[in-house]
Image: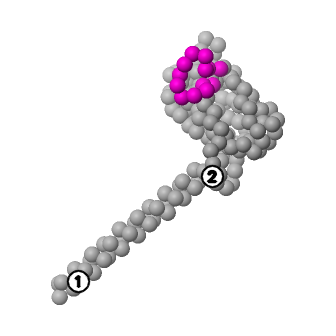
């Protein structure tokens, strides 16, 4: 009799393992799909947007946003409060990092519902949005009013 009960225990354990894997897969898939929804959108976007790299810095000019054209740091690729140019309907991702050791910073573009959290030193955040309005808009830090820049959508 004990031999007949043993296969039932194995099949029950196997069922729980398979059910657990399915639940984890569904939860993971839901998370991935939700991460593809831009902050000012309602449906997932399957594609790659324009990457915009901005850093918060404290220089002799005060608190500023600095633009870096790529991941490699070199002289000549940094601009202060850089203008950002997009076309209407374009998907864009702002990759923002605080490079200021002493102060927290954030970035906001109110018209596109872009609002980062207050970031500490060397803390990054990526925010994806759709440039769905034309015009010139301001991006700014709510903690330091002098940190501003323009984003133009044509």
Rendering coords of residue 142 (x, y %) = 66, 30
Q: Would you say the magenta stretch is mainly helix, strand or loop?
A: loop
Residue 5 image label: 1
| Residue 133 appears left or right of 70 | right
Residue placed at 81% from the left, 37% from the top? 154
Rendering coords of residue 66 (x, y %) = 62, 23
Mark 2 — residue? Answer: 46
| Quadrant of the image containing the N terminus | bottom left
Residue that sits furthest to the top in the current view:
60
Residue placed at 78% from the left, 36% from the top? 153
Q: Which residues are magenta?
A: 67-79
Magenta segment includes 70: yes
Of residue 53 and residue 55, the one placed in the foreground of this image is 53
Q: Quadrant of residue 112?
A: top right
Magenta segment includes 71: yes
Which one is in front in this view, the residue at disc 2 or the one at disc 1? 2
Residue that sits furthest to the left in the current view:
2
| Residue 33 appears left or right of 25 | right
Q: Is residue 112 above or below residue 85?
A: below
Q: Is residue 131 above or below residue 85?
A: below
* Disc 2 + disc 1, Cβ < 8 Å: no
Residue placed at 59% from the left, 32% from the top? 96
| Residue 48 appears left or right of 90 | left
For label 1, count other residues whose C-alpha is less than 10 Å away and answer few (under 14), some (14-19) or many (20+): few
Q: Quadrant of residue 44?
A: bottom right
Rendering coords of residue 122 (x, y %) = 50, 28
Determine the secondary structure under disc 2.
loop
Residue placed at 58% from the left, 18% from the top? 58
Number of numbered labels in the structure image: 2
């Amino acid at each position: 009799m004990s031999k007949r009960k043993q296969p039932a225990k194995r099949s029950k354990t196997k069922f729980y393992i398979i059910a657990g894997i399915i639940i984890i897969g569904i939860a993971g898939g839901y998370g991935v799909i939700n991460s593809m929804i831009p902050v000012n959108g309602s449906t997932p976007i399957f594609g790659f947007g324009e990457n915009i790299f901005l850093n918060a810095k404290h220089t002799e000019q005060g608190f500023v946003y600095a633009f870096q054209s790529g991941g490699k740091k070199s002289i000549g690729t940094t601009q202060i409060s850089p203008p950002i140019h997009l076309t209407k309907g374009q998907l864009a991702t702002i990759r923002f990092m605080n490079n200021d050791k002493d102060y927290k910073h954030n970035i906001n573009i109110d018209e596109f519902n872009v609002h980062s959290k207050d970031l500490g030193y060397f803390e990054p955040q990526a925010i994806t949005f759709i440039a769905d309005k034309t015009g010139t808009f301001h991006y700014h830090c709510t903690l330091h009013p002098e940190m501003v820049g323009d984003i133009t959508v044509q």
